[in-house]
Image: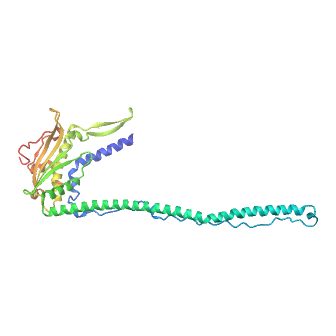
């Protein structure tokens, strides 16, 4: 339980540190995306049925059994032994031995005669197995090559789309600039406990990006100060952050997200296709009066490239910078006090 408390508190501290340093985290990175490095190449896995590439071993040749050899029985009668019926008994033994040898020899001849037919059957079975292997190999190869072709087509499509995007950017087309901005913002990674979404459109005539950033609501941000283990009840309990701490953290995060977004776009757009950004930072919640979803604007600010890129964002106070930009900033983002956007971002 103590180890779990330690782990929970470490995760909580890491999350709060990330939320408190949303802008600094972005300043450590170069937000420019080199589209040329996004070109893909095909990597095919090895053929998945190498077992089918090995030929079936031919059956071993059938070896004929050794030819039976006649061995005359021993104990032929000599002297008086032959007088008292010995020759007769021996003659009978010889006859029986010869009959047995003849039967054995006959069986051997039949076995030898069967060998060519057996070998033929073995060869036919081997050929049938080999034909089945070759058919399975051909099908496996066909499927493998089809999958390879699909991968090649997919990569070719990705690279063709990328080339089209690069050409579009060269002509500053609206679609190309918007797609590039989408790539840049997709690369902007926020903490898991503070997810952010973007919606935007580029006006090529004005060279302005109109951008809305949607933040999690203040009640969606963790409010636990720390976890502790209570031995008496054998359970883990949590203490809550004060309203002041929650309010300050959320207000600071809102301001940092606004400046971070402006910074990421201007820094990534090295060709200065975007000259101004009209930015709104909003959050979604349930209206207490109507019970229906509502969007609350918390920041509305317009920034031009020439002015904004002169700021040293590593040394600023976010709210002061927004004030310097004549931004409309909620007086109390934590309590969802909206700014007036009835006259647009530049109100």
Q: Residue 213: image x %, image y %?
A: 17, 48
Instruction: Kindly indicate the quadrant of the structure image that contains residue 135.
Output: bottom left
Q: Is residue 68 visible?
A: yes
Return the residue nearer the eye: 179 or 142.
142
Q: Is residue 346 above or below residue 54?
A: above
The total of numbered circles placed on residues is: 0
Q: Is residue 228 above or below residue 92?
A: above
Q: Is residue 317 visible?
A: no
Q: Quarter holding the N terminus? A: top left
Q: Residue 320: image x %, image y %?
A: 12, 49
Q: Is residue 81 left or right of residue 328?
A: right
Its colouring scheme is: rainbow
Q: Is residue 242 above or below residue 78?
A: above
Question: Which residue is found at the position 27% from the left and 39% from the top?
Answer: 224
Q: Is residue 241 left or right of residue 50?
A: left
Q: Is residue 267 left or right of residue 70?
A: left
Q: Residue 318: image x %, image y %?
A: 15, 49
Q: Is residue 109 above or below residue 181?
A: below
Question: Which residue is found at the position 25% from the left and 63% from the top?
Answer: 37
Return the residue nearer the eye: 225 or 65.
65
Instruction: Kindly indicate the quadrant of the structure image that contains residue 12.
Output: top left
């Amino acid at each position: 339980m103590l180890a779990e408390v330690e782990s929970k508190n470490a995760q909580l501290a890491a999350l709060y540190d990330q939320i408190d340093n949303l802008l600094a985290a972005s300043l450590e990175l170069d937000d420019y995306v080199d589209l040329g490095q996004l070109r893909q190449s095909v990597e095919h896995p090895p053929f998945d049925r190498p077992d089918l590439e090995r030929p079936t071993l031919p059956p071993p040749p059938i070896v004929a059994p050794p030819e039976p050899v006649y061995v005359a029985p021993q104990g032929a009668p000599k002297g008086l032994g032959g007088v008292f019926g010995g020759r007769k008994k021996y003659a009978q033994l010889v006859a029986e031995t010869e009959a047995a040898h003849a039967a054995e020899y006959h069986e051997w001849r039949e076995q030898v005669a069967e060998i060519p037919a057996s070998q033929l059957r073995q060869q036919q079975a081997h050929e049938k197995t080999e034909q089945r292997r070759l058919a399975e190999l051909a099908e496996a190869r066909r499927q493998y090559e089809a999958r390879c072709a699909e991968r090649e087509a997919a990569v070719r499509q990705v690279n063709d789309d990328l080339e089209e995007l690069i050409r579009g950017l060269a002509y500053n087309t609206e679609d190309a600039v918007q797609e590039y901005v989408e790539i840049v913002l997709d690369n902007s990674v926020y903490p898991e406990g503070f997810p952010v979404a973007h919606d935007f459109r580029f006006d090529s005539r004005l060279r302005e990006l109109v951008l809305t950033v949607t933040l999690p609501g203040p009640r969606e941000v963790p409010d636990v100060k720390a976890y502790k283990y209570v031995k008496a009840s054998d359970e883990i309990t949590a203490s809550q952050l004060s309203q002041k701490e929650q309010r300050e953290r959320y207000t600071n995060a809102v301001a940092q997200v606004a400046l971070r977004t402006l910074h990421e776009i201007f820094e990534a757009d090295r060709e200065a296709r975007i000259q101004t950004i009209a930015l709104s930072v909003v959050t979604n919640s349930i209206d207490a009066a109507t019970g229906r979803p509502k969007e609350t604007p918390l920041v509305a600010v317009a920034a031009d490239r020439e002015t904004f890129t002169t700021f040293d964002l590593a040394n600023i106070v976010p709210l002061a910078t927004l004030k310097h930009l004549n931004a409309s900033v909620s007086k109390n983002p934590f309590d969802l006090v909206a700014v007036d956007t009835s006259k647009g971002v530049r109100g």
